[in-house]
Amino acid sequence: MATTIKDDPFRVSNRYGYVAFAGNAKDSRRTNVFINLADNFFIDYRDPWATPFGRISKEGMQIVEKFYGGYSKLPDNEQPDQRSIAGFGNHYLEDKFPKLTEIVNIELVQYHHSEL
């Protein structure tokens, strides 16, 4: 079984532009992260392990909003399969989802502990 990441204590809500680990239960986080594309306060209560750990700058979110979003409209049985992603990685994604936007570089611009 793969190593999991322990949950962080809750500090801020899942707001637009905040980044958090995805999981499915207490201390279940691994390497999947998501960017909140809206204020998702319901996640704070439904998925308490999804505590934001970062925030994308305003300029960065202008880029994120241009990511290809067509796959979100696929039926559930055609959505990306997490087990296939874990088992086959980018080969699976490139084959099944060739229009997927790829992040190739991330830069830490500044860090203010009080904001997160």
Image (cartoon, rainbow, N blue to C red):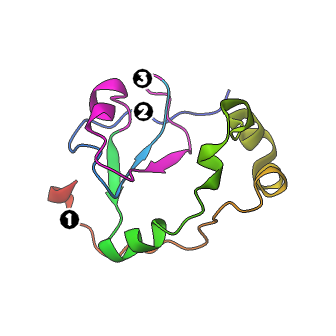
> Nearest the camera: 16 or 23?
16
Indicate the amino acid at tag 3: Lys
**80 w.r.t. 68: above or below:** above
Q: CA distance from mark 3 to mark 2?
A: 8 Å
Going from the N terminus, do you reach mark 2 or mark 1 first?
Answer: 2
Indicate the amino acid at tag 1: His
Residue 29 is situated, as x and y percent measured from the top left of the image, at: 50, 35
Residue at x-position 45% and y-position 66%: 65
Q: Which mark is residue 112?
A: 1
* Residue 68 falls left or right of residue 5: right
Q: Which residue is mark 3?
A: 26
Residue 83 is situated, as x and y percent measured from the top left of the image, at: 73, 33
- Characterize the local packing of mark 2: few (<14), some (14-19) or many (20 or more) Cα atoms within 10 angstroms: few
Query: Does residue 26 belong to the magenta stretch?
Result: yes
Q: Which mark is residue 6?
A: 2
Query: Does residue 103 belong to the magenta stretch?
Result: no
Q: Secondary structure at mark 3?
A: loop
- Characterize the local packing of mark 3: few (<14), some (14-19) or many (20 or more) Cα atoms within 10 angstroms: few
Going from the N terminus, do you reach mark 3 or mark 1 first?
Answer: 3
In contact (CB < 8 Å): disc 2 and disc 1: no
* Residue 13 falls left or right of residue 103: left
Residue at x-position 18% and y-position 58%: 115
The stretch of residues the image draws in magenta is 25-50
Q: CA distance from mark 2 to mark 1?
A: 22 Å
